[in-house]
Amino acid sequence: MNNRMTHLKQLEAESIYILREVAATFEKPVMMYSIGKDSSVMLHLAMKAFYPAKPPFPLLHVDTLWKFKEMIEFRDRRVKELGVDLVVHSNPEGIEMGINPFVHGSKVHTDIMKTQALKQALNKGGYDAVIGGARRDEEKSRAKERIFSFRDKNHRWDPKNQRPELWNLFNTKIHKGESVRVFPLSNWTELDIWQYIYLEKIPIVPLYLAKERPVVEYEGAKIMVDDDRVPEELRKKARNEVVRFRTLGCYPLTGAIESTASTLPEIIQEMLLSKSSEREGRLIDKDQEGSMEKKKIEGYF
Amino acid sequence: MQNTQQQSISDNIEKYLKEHENKQMLRFITCGSVDDGKSTLIGRLLYDSKMIFEDQLAAAKNETKKYGTVEGEEIDFALLIDGLQSEREQGITIDVAYRFFSTDKRKYIIADTPGHEQYTRNMVTGASTADLAVILIDARKGVLTQTRRHAFLVGLLGIRNIVVAINKMDLVDYSEARFEQIVKDYRQMYEQLRFSLPYKSFHQKIDFIPLSALRGDNVVEHSERMPWYEGEALLPYLDTVTIERSEFDAFRFPVQYVNRPNLDFRGYAGTIASGTVCCDDRIIVYPSKKSSRIRQIVPPLSPEAKNEEETKEAFESMAVTLTLADEIDISRGDMIVKEGEKEPYFSDSFEAMLVWMDEEAMKNREYTLKLYAKESNASIASVMFKRDVNNWEKIETKTLELNDIARVKIDLAEKVAFDLYEENKKTGAFILIDKITNNTVAAGMIAGVSTRQKKERVYTEAEKALNAYVREFYPEWGCKPC
């Protein structure tokens, strides 16, 4: 324990250590950039870790083509402001098939536009280390996830074949064709993320803040009508409501919450007083029990 | 979460945030088996500090019906916190899980490890990053073999703060006499333990808390059912306990990454392992032993934050980038220390306590040793003895298998700078990596320096002939016979 550092400074220092370890020991690292709040924090940490240089790895965004418009605008603006490299990949086969979550459902959409697209992007880029923003507090199956999580040649995660992690001595050795997923935010909680964003004044996508938006009930969640690909019968039923999003993803799969929290402190306040966990708004987790673990074995981040 | 905290969140969130910016972080490990009520205790800490939400609670209620080991309407906390589907179905825990909660004062990270014997490696892993250990004892059963195992492992990993949580007090009628007996037994065991650990000046601060995780006695609030107990409940104890530290305070800076964005800037990035450093301090770099002076200390800066500046002083755990006044050759794995402070050991051989972590037994081959950012070829020159994790007796052996704990001599291909683990964990801990499988096969703690016994070199017939040829035809080279 360190008496001279606050928990946020310590988390920051530990994440920076992890990012530098990746840069120093892998040949071709890449940082996943999902445009969400965790990605914003991760990008901020990467800028700090290598200052005055730029991060020695590009960002990778797997674009499912169903992200909120505001997310894409935010992404392009941040990349320009910070002068970092960005690689964007969408699954060309998925585009050809015209994958549509409203038609094909969340399972097929996520598999083709996210899981398969990610595999394509990683194979194409030949990355040996993929930095992701997952946190251990997000979901039960992540509590045991390593910071350096080992993947075989097919990007598969084998829960029985993970290396022990002792002290801060990470084993970064891999064979050709294998890779690691690295999670520098492993030990951060949702509250830590928000506090750090607040303290460091890190820009985030405005969708996190409450505003009047057109929403409609869809499969038990309130989704936003972000463009006219929303089926007409749903669009007709849309109403303007003051809502915000606790997590960001594909707009047809991301449930809005009723909220008037329009500033960061209000978001944090709402989170602290809330009675439900962060992932509740994500439709993909509810498919089946233990579904995150299954997705991970299949290669989903 | 206490109502007062909720109230302050509702009343003035800005003030609340300001207060919470200054929290400290405490990592602890919980040692005990499911039978000791470990999951119940963790579940309660998480639930009371609101890290378990209503939707997760509802899911756990569903699952309790399916897999639970708990009768009636009680929620099986073990299901709430156990992660992997495969292990949930078997009802056992197979790995280290990290759990998080926080109070007004501290953010906590719990390394939750199974207490089962063959999982020594899990406990060692969890203990390696912990500042404090909570050792659970079932009040009905007292100090058991597994308690000795837990005490030994957390001692071996150098944890200086121990909380012995004597659980299930409700099942012994909250008996003070029973509590006192267990305290006495544990203390007796500890006296013995100190002689079994390789650390000379190591001692632990040990406190005992009688509690019932199931009923919530002495977990968050002091229990009225045990008025004879004058200490604090577990959570307030954790909130205020001072973490014991080694007295070691010399500056150690392992160079992690050389940052060279342009010709004008050559920075050495790393996390300060111990001590403090100021601008203009005289430093020495290992292994070259070249000296220089600190020119700049660059903290982690965001290019967008205009108000941050270079810092004049940096201390332990800070991730900084240093620049030096002189251009000397420094690379990843080097160590920067301060002139005039305690020097690190500098040797190509040391003695260490080694925990074998791999399914495959130790082989007579070279391994990659990783010590801070330094990687070096290493071999286990000899296994001096291994220790039984339960009775702490020395056992003679030549080889090591999964979960074995041994004192070994390690030879390195080059001289490296290091400290003893008991003085400085950051520069005295290492792992061994198998060069073929790339597995992490062992974890080590440096316990002493040793002298390398150079093996007598054996020459082949061809080499002997070459030597004879050189001596005969080139006497002016002054070649020695082999």
Image (cartoon, coloured by chain):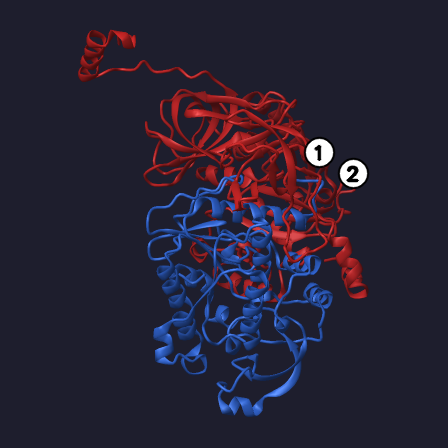
Chain colours: A blue, B red
Q: Does residue A144 lie above or below B208 as drawn? A: below
Q: Residue A96: x, y in percent?
A: 35, 79
> Left of B365 or right of it: where is B351?
right
Q: Residue B152: x, y in percent?
A: 55, 30
Question: Which chain is indicated by disc 1?
Answer: B
Q: Secondary structure at mark 2?
A: loop
Look at 67% across and 27% down and name the residue there.
Answer: B247
**Foreground mark, 2 or 1?**
2
Q: Residue B63: x, y in percent?
A: 51, 63
Figure quadrant of the N terminus of chain A: top right
Same chain assignment for discs 2 and 1: yes
Question: Which chain is indicated by disc 2?
Answer: B
Q: Which mark is residue B449?
A: none
The answer to which quarter of the image holds residue B323 is top right
Name the residue beneath numbered marker 2.
Answer: B230
Look at 33% across and 48% down and name the residue there.
Answer: A176
The amino acid sitting under disc 2 is Glu
Q: Residue A148: x, y in percent?
A: 47, 49
In front of the other: B257 or B30: B257
> Left of B170 or right of it: where is B412?
left
Figure quadrant of the C terminus of chain A: bottom left
Q: Which mark is residue B177?
A: 1
Of callouts 2 and 1, which one flags the residue occurring earlier in the amino acid sequence?
A: 1
In front of the other: B283 or A122: B283
In front of the other: B54 or A299: A299
Q: Are the residues flagged by discs 2 and 1 in contact, CB closer than 8 Å?
A: no
